[in-house]
């Protein structure tokens, strides 16, 4: 069985980050280790969460892993909340990357804006950090920030997407995926470029109107599980789009506070079937 490690925060309430990654990747038949970067009572859509920064605990955890000889077939980084954590993860990749793949989700903004607490220096450092990845999966906002170009908003062409993807692989990663792409009404998905094969492709699913928190984490987690199973990038992106769209569809049918996240649990059978 393959073993990956995912490095991101843990929100005790609200489906995102580790509470999404751990069950999804495990359901795909991949042993999933975790390295929490922070502990939150809830994600930040809820007001005033209690937050415990775990930066100081990371070295002792990774030192112990080195002592007991833990190895990973893949490293998946998500939300990293500081420049210090970026530096630590660069060293972590050097130490534990080995022959496995490195998958980076550069979580730092959306809708044309940086998330609270992030700076232009962080963007620049994240762009350099992405050069250590084999696969990077920014949304359009994050891609435009790292490439120092104007935010495209909803106005872009397929040629624009190809240019951005080539720019992203120019940062050093072999493969890049742009999430949250829509090329026609009623459709939403991702665009990707596999630099090793010179292949570009689009994968679209049915769009459900509304705002749904945590979908980027769901998408990335399915990609990681698929890649660990030996899927190609195209197959991984297709599986991630299908699963994310189905999870959103199930959520839209519920009468619940959407701050608690997307009902990915109701779609897990799609992943467990693929893992057999």
Image (tube, grey):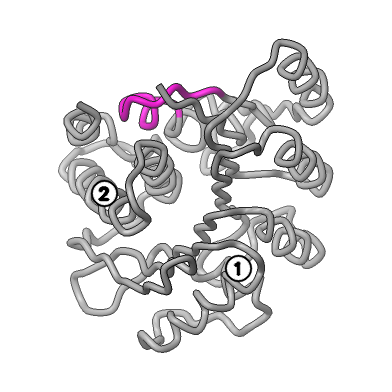
Which residue is rendered at x = 68% and y = 44% of the image?
80
Picture coordinates of residue 215, whole percent (x, y): 38, 48
Picture coordinates of residue 260, whole percent (x, y): 39, 35
Which residue is rendered at x = 22% and y = 51% of the image?
242
Magenta span of residues: 22-33
Is residue 27 covered in magenta?
A: yes
Q: Say which element carries label 2.
A: helix
Picture coordinates of residue 263, whole percent (x, y): 28, 36
Which residue is rendered at x = 63% and y = 83% of the image?
149
Is 177 or 44 nearer to us in this picture? 177
Q: Which residue is mark 2?
A: 239
Is 83 or 75 nearer to us in this picture? 75
Q: Quadrant of residue 119?
A: bottom right
Is 236 or 260 nearer to us in this picture? 236
Q: Closer to the camera: disc 1 or disc 2? A: 2
Give the CA separation, mark 1 to mark 2.
28 Å
Residue 122 vs residue 154: left or right?
A: right
Residue 239, above or below 172: above
Q: Would you call the spot at circle 2 few (<14 residues within 10 Å), some (14-19), or many (20 or more)?
A: many
Q: Say which element carries label 1.
A: strand
Give the farthest residue toward the top: 68
The N terminus is located in which quarter? top left
Q: Which residue is mark 1?
A: 113
Picture coordinates of residue 222, whole percent (x, y): 36, 42
Residue 69, above or below 171: above
Which residue is rendered at x = 50% and y = 68% of the image?
111
Residue 41 vs residue 82: left or right?
A: left
Is residue 200 covered in magenta?
A: no
């Amino acid at each position: 069985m393959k073993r990956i490690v995912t490095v991101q925060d843990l929100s005790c309430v609200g489906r995102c980050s580790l509470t999404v990654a751990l069950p999804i990747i495990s359901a795909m038949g991949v042993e999933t280790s975790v390295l929490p970067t922070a502990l939150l009572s809830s994600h930040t859509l809820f007001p005033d969460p209690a937050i415990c920064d775990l930066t100081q605990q990371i070295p002792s955890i990774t030192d112990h892993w080195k002592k007991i000889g833990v190895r990973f077939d893949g490293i998946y980084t998500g939300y990293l909340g500081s420049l210090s954590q970026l530096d630590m993860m660069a060293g972590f990749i050097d130490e534990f990357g080995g022959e496995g793949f490195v998958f980076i989700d550069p979580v730092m903004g959306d809708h044309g804006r940086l998330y609270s607490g992030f700076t232009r220096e962080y963007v620049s450092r994240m762009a350099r950090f992405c050069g250590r990845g084999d696969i990077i999966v920014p949304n359009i906002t994050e891609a435009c920030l790292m490439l120092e170009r104007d935010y495209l908003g909803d106005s872009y062409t397929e040629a624009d997407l190809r240019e951005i993807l080539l720019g992203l692989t120019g940062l050093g990663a072999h493969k890049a995926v742009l999430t949250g792409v829509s090329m026609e009404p009623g459709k939403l998905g991702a665009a990707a470029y596999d630099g090793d094969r010179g292949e570009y492709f689009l994968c679209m699913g049915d769009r459900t109107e509304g705002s749904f928190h945590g979908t980027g984490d769901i998408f990335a987690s399915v990609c990681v599980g698929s890649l660990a199973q030996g899927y190609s990038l195209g197959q991984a992106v297709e599986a991630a789009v299908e699963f994310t769209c189905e999870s959103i569809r199930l959520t839209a049918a519920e009468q619940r506070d959407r701050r608690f996240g997307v009902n990915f649990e109701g779609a897990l059978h799609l992943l467990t079937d693929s893992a057999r």
